[in-house]
């Protein structure tokens, strides 16, 4: 006989920051064409496309279960989101973020 697990909820991996919704929907990528506060004009078109792909497709590490750019738009003070954007930009500048298509 299997125990009843109707009330079972997995523990979060990290605390959800204040201001983020507590009942999180499934992750859905976004389709933003700009990153607020970031000037992408210094990057090539290929680099801009790669940056926009990543910030739209990768979930924000803060745990809000939105894309990095959606979190930046909704929660501009999120430190985890800012760090994630800065890391992606640094990787793209160094060529490390380009992957096999470069």
Image: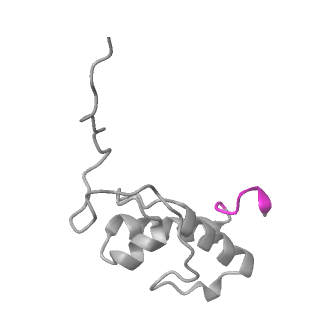
Residue 59's spot in the image, x, y percent?
Answer: 47, 59
Q: Is residue 4 magenta?
A: no
* Residue 99 picture location, percent across and down: 71, 57
- Name the residue located 50 percent from the left edge and 84 percent from the top edge: 38
The part of the image, by quadrant, that contains residue 93 is bottom right
Residue sitting at x 62%, y 68%: 53
Say which of 64 and 98 sits in front: 64
* Front position in the image: 46 or 23: 23
State left or right for residue 78 relative to residue 51: left
Region of the chain picked out in magenta, as a range: 96-101
As for residue 98 lying within the magenta part, the answer is yes
Which residue, as the protein is rendered here, is positioned at the far right? 101
Q: Which one is in front, 82 or 62?
A: 62
Which quarter of the rendering shows the C terminus? bottom right
Locate residue 67, reporting x and y percent. 47, 65
Residue 49: x, y in percent? Answer: 68, 75
Name the residue at the left extreme: 18
Direction from residue 2 to residue 36 in the image, left or right:
right
Quarter in which the N terminus is drawn: top left
**Against 13, is 24 above or below?**
below
Q: How is the image coloured?
A: one colour
Q: Residue at x 27, y 33 (%)?
A: 6
Q: Is residue 76 above or below residue 15?
A: below
């Amino acid at each position: 006989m299997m125990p009843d697990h109707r009330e079972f909820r997995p523990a979060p991996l990290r605390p959800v920051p204040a201001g983020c919704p507590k009942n999180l929907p499934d992750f859905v990528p976004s389709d933003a064409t700009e990153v607020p506060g970031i000037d992408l004009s210094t990057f090539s078109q290929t680099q801009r496309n790669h940056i926009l792909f990543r910030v739209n497709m990768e979930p924000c590490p803060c745990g809000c279960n939105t894309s990095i750019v959606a979190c930046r738009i909704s929660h501009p003070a999120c430190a985890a989101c800012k760090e994630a954007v800065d890391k992606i930009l640094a990787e793209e500048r160094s060529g490390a973020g380009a992957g096999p298509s470069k």
